[in-house]
Amino acid sequence: MSADLALLGRQVRHELVALRRTPLTMILSIVFPLLFFILLAAVVGNETIDSRQGVRLAQFLAPSMASFGVVMATFSFLAAGFAEARSTGVLKRQGGTPLPRWALLGGRIGAALLLGLVATSLVIGTGAALYGVQVFARTLPAVLVTLVLASVSFSAMGLAAALLLPTPQATIAVTNGIVIPIAFVSDTFMVNGTLPSWMSTLGWMFPLKHLVNLLGDAFNPYLTGTGFQLDHLAAIAAWGVGGALVAAWALRREQDRTAVRRRQARSARASDARPRRTTSPSPAALLVGQVQHSVRVLTRDATAVFFAIAFPILLVALIPTVNGGGDQRMADGQTLGAFFAATMAAYGAAVTAYVNLPTGLAEARDLGVLQRMHATPLPAWTLLAGRVVGAQVVAVVTLAGIDVVGGVMYGTPIPAALPAVLLTLLLATTCFAVVGIAVMTLVRSASSMIGVTLGVLLPLCFISDVFVVGVSYPPVLQGLSWFFPLRHATNALTSAAGATGLGGGFSWVHLGVLAAWTLAGAAVVAVRFSWVRLEPRQRRRV
């Protein structure tokens, strides 16, 4: 028994050590819930609700963010890691070792459990230290039991998702595509608002809402008792059992068929051979080819497609709905649907151009692809310009999808100043892309690149009127938001979307700031861009 526990402990430690190689997992699992808690506390305020008992608004916000941390650390993290191990053949190689299957799965579930506890502890600890969140000894046993049960249940569902979905990219896209909408209908991000009745009913069908209510009641100072609620615990356990059964069936199916499919090289027949090019391609042909390649790269990754295209469209459907409906009028007369359509277009362009594009370039640089391309007739400006134009194409596609959803759900018309909307979006996308490429030249690896870009973009989204509107921020955050280009892009797009004239809608001050950032980023790229990744010693020699 002790030997089995030691084996399981070593496997858990191995999985935790592997986390250092995946900064995206750490960001999604630990940083996101804590960051959302801090930003939402700043957005909605942390006013005192009950001065006699010292109850503040964060008392009811912390449990929901802790629940979000649990589901991200277990369901999303475990599914992504298991799918990656499956696709790279790690599971097949581990199957040929003396490591028992139960230890392999138990190590991943144990690592996910510890990660969820860390995420929860950070949220609750930060709330207690900075926001006056009260922790009650009478409900601590119930909190611990709930967290362990929820972590195991969500882990089982994550294993099932990883075994059913074909690729790691699809797994990341689908799991996050499931978690985010369910979080909205499970009162995770709700503080003062009320969901429509059909959304509230839908939320009760999934385990996250039961977890949110369990932790919320355990931290509710106006309730009594130990915090154990068997009905909610039973619902969470039922989902876990179902996930475990599906995972066991999928794992058995995986063992019965070929684990890795080999791709056979296609031999070109002489009759099908195309004539070789005898002249160098023109710059225009090279640019068109790079644009086509860039669009393929940006759209063939299911994860990139979800976060850059599907996620903004999904938020346009959700955010106005939970805030009273997309036809609600704001102070300036613009509807919520039109406003968030513009902000989500800016967000989608930023994810495509500032996160996905430079991360793809960094990966190509790390793998030596750019170095091999350097030996071809392709100039550097053609490579970079093709990437930027490809990002613009994806941003326009995202805008079209957002407009379709807004028109169908809220009756939002096509903006009267459509030329201004399109030109503003193209300039904003260019700015994000150039700045992102500049950051790529300063960051050494692709794994660090995604951590840097997401770590900058997501906080800026909250203070740049992307996810919320009409919020008064502290002067420091207010000034910081106006320094970076995202807020200028958001304001320029919302102004263009609300303009009434066909030829109007241009916010020249905001566009000027975007142009300035573009020129500054281009200057950095001109000096720093290299086809290869230079190590410190190589840099000194150069």
Image (cartoon, rainbow, N blue to C red):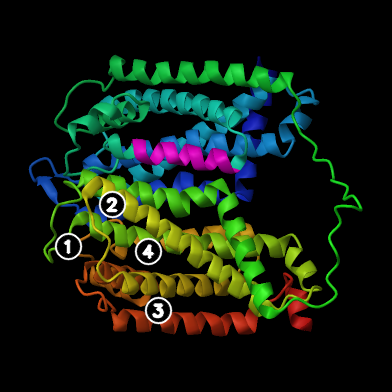
**Is the C terminus in the top left, top right, bottom left or bottom right quadrant?**
bottom right
- Check disc 1 and give the amino acid type: Gln
* Label number found at residue 514: 3
Marks 1, 3: nearer the viewer: 1
**Distance Cα–Cα, label 2 vs label 4:** 15 Å
Residue at 31 percent across and 69 percent down: it is 418
Q: Earlier in the sequence, mark 4 or mark 1?
A: 1
Q: Residues within 10 Å of mark 3 (few under 14, many from 20)?
A: many
Q: Earlier in the sequence, mark 3 or mark 2?
A: 2
- Check disc 3 and give the amino acid type: Leu
Q: Residues within 10 Å of mark 1 (few under 14, many from 20)?
A: some
Q: Is residue 233 above or below residue 56?
A: above
**Residue at the spot of label 2:** 406
Q: Position of residue 204 (x, y in %)?
A: 28, 25
| SS category of the residue bearing label 4 | helix
**Residue at the spot of label 4:** 346
Say left or right for 222 vs 233: left
**Distance Cα–Cα, label 4 vs label 1:** 17 Å
Q: Tell me whether circle 1 and circle 3 mark residues in contact (CB < 8 Å).
A: no
**Distance Cα–Cα, label 3 vs label 2:** 26 Å
Magenta-colored span: 169-182
| SS category of the residue bearing label 1 | loop
Q: Main secondary structure of the magenta part?
A: helix
Q: Earlier in the sequence, mark 1 or mark 3?
A: 1
**Distance Cα–Cα, label 2 vs label 1:** 13 Å
Q: Nearer the viewer, residue 332 or 403?
A: 403
Q: Residue furthest front?
A: 271
Q: Position of residue 111 (x, y in %)?
A: 56, 34
**Residue at the spot of label 1:** 334
| SS category of the residue bearing label 2 | helix
